[in-house]
């Protein structure tokens, strides 16, 4: 008997099939025209193979470094070793910023008036008190004298004196570079040079035989005799 085998099922001559039938595998044509066996590719919705795999999440910030060792923000100094603010003292052994200290100027003390010894004088020295006596008074050099009372005649024979008189009938200046102030005087005669004489009241006459002397008076003297040069009366 000749048997025909079909798909795993054997047919006898009488047409009965013997054996079990199993489905034939699906045959698909290959690219080269041959048959390829095997299951058909699954439809993955157009995705490329491997697209259904989970991708790692993208970085939250572009270019951001990880937190460990993270760089400080732009312009911000790191906390450790941070520079102190302007004018702020550093905390740990840092050097203090230079502070400009403005000190008030020291006032110049006023000249103290002290009573000077006879024959000595200077700036700030108090005039030594003297009393006028009847007759003539002669004064040498470098004195700071203040005379009270009324003197008949005062002759300044020295230089560089600073003298104050309450009243003089007649003042004669023979020295140079003297500064003399008189409240009341009638007659002033100056034979020396570079003297300054001030008479507040009562001046009646002035006579110059020296040079470069100046007399100032509250009253205009009635008579002025000038045989020197450079002398003035105001």
Image (tube, rainbow, N blue to C red):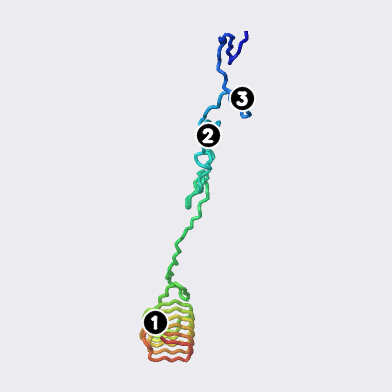
Quarter of the image that includes the C terminus? bottom left
- Give above or below for 170 relative to 83: below
Q: Nearer the viewer, mark 3 or mark 1?
A: 3
Element at label 2: loop
Q: Which residue is mark 3?
A: 35
Q: Earlier in the sequence, mark 2 or mark 3?
A: 3
Q: Which residue is mark 2?
A: 56
- Give above or below for 222 relative to 103: below
The CA distance from mark 3 to mark 1 is 151 Å
Residue at 38% across, 91% down: 222
Q: Mark number for residue 173?
A: none
Dot 2 alpha-carbon crowd within 10 angstroms: few under 14, some 14 to 19, many 20 or more: few
Residue 89 location, x and y as percent?
48, 49
The CA distance from mark 1 to mark 2 is 113 Å
- Give above or below for 205 relative to 95: below
Residue extending farthest to the front is 14
* In contact (CB < 8 Å): disc 3 and disc 1: no
Element at label 1: strand
Left or right of 34 in this view: 227: left
Element at label 3: strand
Q: Which residue is mark 1?
A: 182
Residue 44 location, x and y as percent?
52, 30
Q: Is residue 176 visible?
A: yes
Q: Nearer the viewer, mark 1 or mark 2?
A: 2
Q: Is residue 134 visible?
A: no
* In contact (CB < 8 Å): disc 1 and disc 2: no
């Amino acid at each position: 008997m000749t048997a025909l085998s079909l798909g795993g099922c054997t047919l006898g001559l009488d047409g009965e099939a013997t054996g079990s039938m199993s489905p034939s595998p699906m045959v698909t044509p290959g690219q080269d025209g041959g048959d390829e066996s095997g299951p058909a590719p699954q439809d993955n919705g157009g995705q490329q193979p491997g697209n259904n795999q989970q991708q790692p999440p993208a970085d939250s910030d572009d270019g951001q470094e990880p937190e460990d060792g993270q760089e400080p923000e732009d312009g911000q100094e790191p906390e450790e070793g941070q520079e102190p603010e302007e004018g702020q003292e550093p905390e740990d052994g840092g050097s203090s910023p230079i502070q400009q200290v403005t000190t008030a100027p020291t006032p110049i003390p006023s000249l103290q008036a002290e009573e000077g010894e006879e024959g000595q004088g200077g700036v700030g020295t108090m005039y030594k008190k003297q009393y006028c006596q009847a007759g003539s008074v002669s004064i040498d050099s470098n004195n700071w004298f203040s005379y009270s009372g009324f003197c008949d005649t005062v002759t300044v024979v020295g230089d560089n004196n600073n003298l104050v008189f309450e009243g003089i009938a007649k003042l004669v200046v023979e020295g140079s570079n003297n500064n003399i102030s008189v409240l009341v005087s009638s007659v002033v005669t100056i034979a020396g040079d570079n003297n300054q004489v001030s008479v507040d009241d009562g001046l009646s006459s002035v006579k110059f035989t020296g040079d470069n002397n100046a007399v100032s008076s509250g009253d205009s003297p009635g008579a002025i005799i000038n045989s020197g040069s450079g002398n003035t009366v105001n």
